[in-house]
Image (cartoon, rainbow, N blue to C red):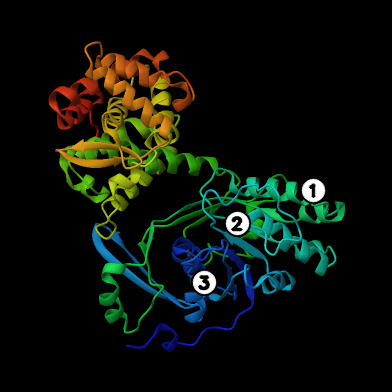
Amino acid sequence: MKAIEQTTKTVDRPDRVLQFGEGNFLRGFAGWQIDILNEKTAFNGNVVVIQPRNREGSQGALINAQRGLYTTVLRGLAEGRPAEEFRLVRSFSRCINPYTQFDEYLGCAENPELRFVLSNTTEAGIAYREGEGPEDRPQVSFPGKVTAFLYRRYEYFRGDPAKALVFIPCELIDRNGDTLRRIVERIASEWKLGEGFLRWLGACVFCNTLVDRIVSGFPREEAEALWEKLGYRDELLTAGELFYLWVIEPPKPGVQPWDYRKEFPLEEAGLNVIWTGNLEFYRTRKVRILNGAHSSTALAAYLYGLDTVDQCTAEPPVSRFMRQALFDEIIPSIEPGGSGTAHEELVRFAEETLERFANPFIKHQLLSISLNSVSKFKARVLPSILSYLKKYGKAPGALCCSLAALIVFYRGNPGGGGMEGRRAGEPYPIKDDQNILRRFAALWAALDGVSGSPALLVHEVLSCRDWWGEDLSAYPAVEDAVTMALETILRDGIAAALAQAGEHTGVSR
């Protein structure tokens, strides 16, 4: 079988995009979209990829060995039926490792065609690092590398504002562009790069973004079969779901989102990209609906006996519970009224979310979602509980039941560097901050003693201000609902608690 680099010619285009990150997500998300952009518009630009970290197992060498070529395999449900799409992506020109090719890396700053900078350096990537300097080759941190790169560009083009760059970071942190700008400005000041550079830096644009697509990466178990189907061997085969969304918010004031639509015409290519002046609606929608549905269902579903997200949509008691949480509690807690355009858009997004969850090609493990569930619950589910309580004057039954399920899931014994729980006699890992695990162990030990009670356990958990950001025991309706659900789980099992949650609020869908 021939290799992918023998299948087709690469396309010689100018490098218009610099991309920090060679991993699965950007290949299956941004690189895939830019390939479509080149096909359907006059953008005519390639991506030069920068390896952000000095680590073994980087895929940069494979990118170069395959001359930038790779294949995406996108699968999911389309109108309820399984669908599969293959694309040979030809938008990458090469990958540069700044730890061994630092001069070539800085040389990219002298490219007059370069305009956009993308990144996905993980949530920890956009962070300040002490002790870096302009003499490092390279700087360790991503913002440090960016500052050195921008200073070279400033010097080479003599401060020409027309050569400023547009940053579109894809890291999953709130206000990612604003954060990156603040750190770069701090570094530039500490390095004493001069007022001229700081003024030129002001001409660079740092967008805030929201990205959404599950990219599972190399489909190891299916690779041979897929290579046979494709007719060539691709070591960078990148699998993901069909759904994707890219929301981009340029900074304000003075810079409007439509300024960049012609320069980076993603919408013109028919891609699901939204340029907006206000990202918050889309962030709230994603965190509260998609992430909230994950976090409010995963632990209860695992205790019920399921292992993956797609199983949740196929098991009626769990599916009804998830739909109740989404349509009866989360959506009403977000939008101001009970009908209208906002309501319809949220319902449509929730239905899309459930179709994504049902994707038979993506086996999203519930135990993966369970990692650090306390902080996830605080960010993803608690805002819906408190908003619902404020709006309706009562506690949302399904979401409070999900908090009770979290408490039960965290019942375990020390082991393997964390805690071990038991489901049907079989161990499962409980992974979170060690202080949280120790606190749960102590609370459950007290319940198992003669003086403990489920009500006291719930009260102690809800009183942990450092977990939730406030004392949740100050909301008696929430405490009562969580206690009732916990008592049902302990007495009758999780299935009975899921059914009880439906009776509490009433399932509308």
- 12 relative position to 68: left or right: right
Q: Is residue 152 above or below residue 414?
A: below
**Looking at numbered disc 3 in the image, what kind of residue is underneath it?**
Gly
Residue drawn at x 33%, y 41% as measured from the top left:
370
Q: Is residue 369 left or right of residue 307?
A: right
Check residue 60 in the rendering and tell me which mark sits there, or answer none.
Answer: 3
- Tell me: residue 306, above or below residue 439: below
User: Residue tagged by mark 2?
Assistant: 168
| Upstream in sequence: badge 1 or badge 2 | 2
Quadrant of residue 81 within the rendered picture? bottom left
Amino acid under disc 2: Ile
- Which residue has dot 1 on it? 189
How dense is the environment of label 2, judged by Cα within 10 Å: few (below 14), some, or many (20 and up)? Answer: many
Location of residue 47 by image quarter: bottom right
> Is residue 183 something that shows in the picture?
yes
Disc 3 and disc 1: Cα gap in Å? 32 Å
Answer whether labels 3 and 1 touch (C-beta < 8 Å): no
Going from N to C along the chain, the mark reached first, 3 or 2, is 3
Residue plotted at (76% across, 66% down): 153
